[in-house]
Image (cartoon, rainbow, N blue to C red):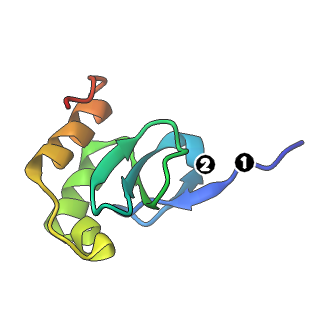
Amino acid sequence: MKKLPQRTCIGCNSKKDKKELIRIVKNKNEEINVDLTGKMDGRGIYICKNEECLDKAIKNKRISRTFEMEIANSIYENIRKIINGGEIIG
């Protein structure tokens, strides 16, 4: 049986299977994207698919500290929409 890769959520710090998390990527052009495929180039971080983890990551500025840049509110709104079962805007 193949072992599934584990990743750590930036919000709650718990380890989960990679497929259960949302990947956020910073590419070489300093752009932040939500990566639903898990294959985009760049530095990636993971977050659980629940709003509590997102709120905790925003409050503690974990995403902006990890990527060493300010994160636009539109990125947070896209992540929130994905968590709530919606589609990405933009």
Q: Position of residue 87 (x, y in %)?
A: 27, 23
Q: Nearer the viewer, residue 16 or 76?
A: 76
For mark 2, what is the residue? 17
Instruction: Name above or below for residue 76 compared with residue 85.
Output: below
Q: Secondary structure at mark 2?
A: strand
Residue 4 image label: 1
Q: Is residue 64 left or right of residue 48?
A: left
Q: Position of residue 19 (x, y in %)?
A: 57, 40
Q: What amino acid is found at the position of numbered circle 1 in the picture?
A: Leu
Instruction: Name above or below for residue 36 compared with residue 25.
Output: above
Q: Position of residue 37 (x, y in %)?
A: 51, 36
Q: Secondary structure at mark 1?
A: loop
Q: Is residue 89 left or right of residue 38?
A: left
Q: Extreme right residue here?
A: 1
The quarter of the rendered structure image containing the C terminus is top left
Q: Residue at x 18, y 61 (%)?
A: 58
Quadrant in which residue 85 is drawn: top left
Choose the circle earlier in sequence order: 1 or 2.
1
Q: Extreme top residue here?
A: 86
Residues marked 1 and 2 touching at CB (< 8 Å): yes
